[in-house]
Image (cartoon, rainbow, N blue to C red):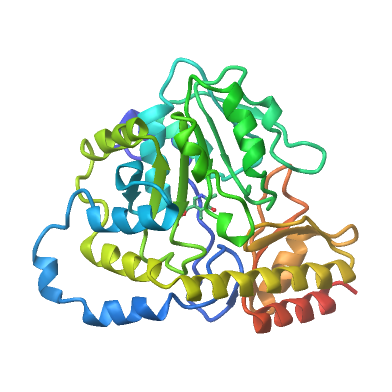
Amino acid sequence: MSKFWSPAVRDLTPYVPGEQPRERLIKLNTNENPYPPAPGVEAALRDFPADHLRRYPDPQSNALREALAAELGVTADQVFVGNGSDEVLAMAFQAFFRQERPLEMPTISYSFYPVYCRLYGIERRTHALDAEWRVDLEAFGQSAGGVIFANPNAPTGHGHDREAIAGLLERVTDSVVLVDEAYVDFGGESAVPLIERFPNLLVTSTFSKSRSLAGLRLGYAVGSRELIEGLERIKDSFNSYPVDSLASALGIASLADRGYFDACREAVITTRERTRDRLETLGFEALPSQTNFVLVSHPDFDAAQLFVGLRERGILVRHFNTDVLRDHLRISIGTDDEMDSLIEALESLCR
Ligand SMILES: *Cc1c(COP(=O)(O)O)cnc(C)c1O
């Protein structure tokens, strides 16, 4: 607390990201990709002329937006890019959700959403997940000053198909529905093809997970021209150059290699299913997952203690100390070797 802070700063509850340890641990706590970025990214990094950094980047990031548009089957004016999807989400909250009516979201979803609500003074209304821990799409649309959820959801892993999302959009037509697809490449179905039909649909995604570029900070949104223009108005009132020229070049290089991208996500999916089976053999309950993590609990062992035991054995996972999630661990999918070490450690802890 400081007397120099603006009054509103005292009331904030900032997001706490997963730990980035300095020692060498098997790091399964922040859903990073265990595989390196596409080889073309390294080549583009080597070839990038340092002299380009003398100039400001293109404020519209046109080259990157065109590359993304081609990849997603939309036009460049339906794409917005930012410095990580967290920033894109922050701009979307400002552009669309500062309304008279509350913003609707699931009780369990990405924990940054309530943080943005506080930052921007947005009231929220939460809806419980259904009995299988899926986002209850039926519940949305009562008060809607907007709707936001992750699909597939975090940290639960379940994703609704496109038809289900279309059903929601048929009902909620007069406010923005934001679908956060940070994990969609690991087995989910993208809602992007629906943007032509629904001008109030905004889909966000990121290069951090499926493209192994969390350190680069690149995220994007896809939606109707009018939504993208709303985001641009916020961007140009805040920071005209959120995406630097190096990030643009490396993002484009990543998009160029579809074969590598597909191979990496297939590897993660295969390891995930193998890991779920082995965890279940150890007596864990592991929710089905369309993401690069699994949410697990064990009927006989305390999650907080397992977290500590794993950490002592050099393995970092995520434990959320909230009422609903206290009994669970979220485990990111690493390489097969890393998951072998995880299973070995859990075998010694769960006996
Ligand atoms: C990781 C994550 C993000 C943020 O991604 P960045 O692009 O790294 O900022 C957004 N939403 C969800 C649901 C995530 O898990």
Give residue 234's quadrant in the image: top left
Classify the position of the N terminus by image quarter. top left
Does residue 36 sit above or below 88 in this rendering?
Answer: below
The answer to whether residue 291 is left or right of residue 182 is: right
Task: Tell me the residue at 50%/43% (across/down).
Answer: 193
Question: How many marks can you see?
Answer: 0
Is 76 in front, or is 288?
76
Point out residue 269 in the picture as x, y percentages from the top left corner.
Answer: 66, 68
Is 272 in front, or is 224?
224
Is 258 in front, or is 7?
258
Does residue 287 sit above or below 194 in this rendering?
Answer: below
Point out residue 129 in the picture as x, y percentages from the top left corner.
Answer: 73, 37
Point out residue 304 in the picture as x, y percentages from the top left corner.
Answer: 74, 59
The answer to whether residue 304 is left or right of residue 106 is: right
The answer to whether residue 3 is left or right of residue 136 is: left
Q: Is residue 252 visible?
A: yes
The answer to whether residue 306 is left or right of residue 322 is: right
Classify the position of the C terminus by image quarter. bottom right
Q: Is residue 14 visible?
A: no
Does residue 18 sit above or below 193 in this rendering?
Answer: below
Task: Tell me the residue at 59%/65% (across/down).
Answer: 29
Give residue 136's quadrant in the image: top right
Does residue 86 sit above or below 256 in this rendering?
Answer: above
Task: Tell me the residue at 76%/56% (across/down).
Answer: 288
Point out residue 256 in the picture as x, y percentages from the top left corner.
Answer: 37, 70
